[in-house]
Amino acid sequence: MEDKDEKRLQSIRERMAQLKAQEKSFIARVKEKERKLRTRRLIENGALAEKYLKCENFSPMQFEEKLKRVVKKIKIADSLRDKNSSSDDRKKAEVKNDSVSAESG
């Protein structure tokens, strides 16, 4: 290889190294930004949970137990609502079928 070609190749390699360093730095900044956003969200959500669950002075274990009880109650309420909803849907379908039968009969 000629001296000129070697210099050109060396220049390209240096530029590639610079770009790799820039890429690494950029990725690190993006990850740090994402971590900070997640941390902020967790703090804000935790503060809201403490406020509305009225457990500001709870230990993490007490807070977890309270949260489990609340989630369990919500699941039960959702399940009951779903049962009632499907029961209501069946009743509506029966009424509709009865009215169609009456009209055709």
Image: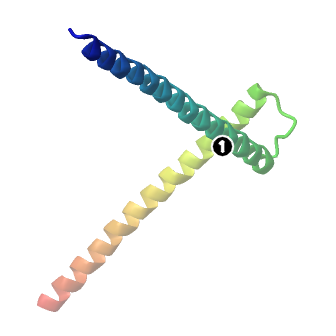
- Please tell me in which quadrant of the rendered image residue 8 appears: top left
Give whichever of 22, 78 is nearer the camera: 22
10 Å crowding of disc 1: few (<14), some (14-19), many (20+): few
Locate the C terminus by quadrant.
bottom left
Q: Quarter-wise, where is residue 20 in the image?
A: top left
What's the residue type where badge 1 is placed? Arg
- Quadrant in which residue 4 is drawn: top left
The residue located at (42%, 63%) in the rendering is 85
Seen at 35% across and 68% down, the residue is: 89
The residue under the point 69% across, 41% down is 40
28 left or right of 53 in image = left
Where's the N terminus, which quadrant?
A: top left
* Res. 105 visible in picture: no
Please say whether residue 3 is visible from this viewpoint: yes
Badge 1 marks a residue whose secondary structure is: helix
Residue designated by label 1? 41
Question: Would you place residue 74 above or below residue 35 in this image?
Answer: below
Give the residue drawn at x 34%, y 22%: 12
Residue 27 horizontal/vertical position (percent): 50, 30
**Where is residue 21 shown, x and y percent of the image?**
49, 23
Q: Is residue 28 above or below residue 14?
A: below
Q: Position of residue 83 (x, y in %)?
A: 43, 56
Outermost residue toward the right in this view:
57
Q: Which of the pair 104/56 is nearer the observer? A: 56
Left or right relative to 31: residue 49: right
Q: Is residue 84 left or right of residue 39?
A: left
